Image (cartoon, rainbow, N blue to C red):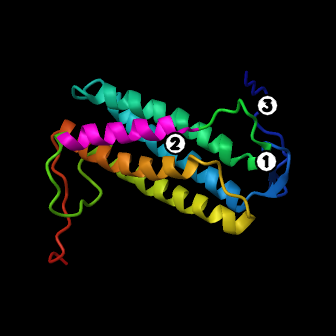
Amino acid sequence: MVRLNRIYTKAGDGGETRLVGGQKVAKNAPRIEAYGTVDELMSCIGLARTALAAPDAPAGARELEAILRRIQNELFNVGSELATLPADLHPRQARVEARHVAALEHEIDGWNDELPELRSFILPGGGWVASYLHLARTVCRRAERLVVGLPSAEGEAPASQVLPYLNRLSDALFVMSRHASRLYGEPEPLWEPERT
């Protein structure tokens, strides 16, 4: 059980923080950047969830909101893994697994089957929910890049499913943004290379 009785500790005032295993690191260390970006991603998804939960949301919005809530929980597990050096991971520590990646793939395929074929790249937009999901997608890609850099920065690779999960999630967020545009009846803004 988690108990947070004190929110501030003043321990980080000197620019350092501790990993789950107790190691003291700089607040701008690559591992902190990685899980901090995952935290940012969860906040972006929170924007989309809030919009989807509006009383006037269309049919299907609640289902998408529930999936995003599940994803936020999975991302918290990703953050927990990234906040822990591989040698310190506890066998019962919550983490993302291959089944989470497979669930995202199943959802991507289901939504994609219902969407019109793409004949151009999509520009971020297509309504508030779609825009929030595009923002989340770009933050997810940044988190993925930071996780890819961990082995060269620290010499330690992240847990085995973190990278596949983030990679698949960015694809899922893209397809979700298209799905959201369709739910809300918003046109998808397409890239028009000659319009410059």
Taking the image as shown, residue 151 lies to the left or right of residue 63, namely right
Q: Quadrant of the C terminus?
A: bottom left
Q: Are marks 2 and 1 in contact (CB under 8 Å)?
A: no
Rendered residue at 54%/33% (across/down): 73
Callout 3–callout 1 Cβ contact below 8 Å? no
For residue 146, say whether it is visible. yes
* Disc 1: which residue: 87
**Residue that mark 3 sits on:** 6
Residue at 26%, 61% in the rendered image: 123
- Whether residue 170 sits left or right of residue 180 in the image: it is right
Q: CA distance from mark 2 to mark 1?
A: 26 Å
Q: Amino acid at mark 2?
A: Met
Judge whether residue 54 can be spotted in this image: no
Give how far apart the Cα atoms at labels 2 and 3 are.
22 Å
Determine which quarter of the picture holds residue 182. top left
Pinpoint residue 168: horizontal percent, then vertical percent: 43, 49
- Image quarter in which the N terminus is found: top right
Could you tell me the amino acid type at mark 1? Answer: Ala
Give the amino acid at mark 3. Arg
Q: Is residue 190 left or right of residue 176?
A: left
Point out the tag, 3 or 1, that comes first from the N-terminus. 3
Q: Nearer the viewer, residue 158 or 72?
A: 158
Residue bounds of the magenta highlight: 96-113
Place of residue 12 in the rendered image (x, y in percent of width and height, measured from the top left): 81, 50
Residue 7 spot, x, y in % from top left: 75, 34
- Mark before the other along the chain sequence, 2 or 1: 2
* Label 2 sits on residue: 42
Seen at 74% across and 48% down, the residue is 86
Counting labels gives 3
| Residue 101 vertical placement versus 193 (above, below) | above
Helix, strand or loop at mark 3: loop
Q: Quadrant of residue 32?
A: bottom right
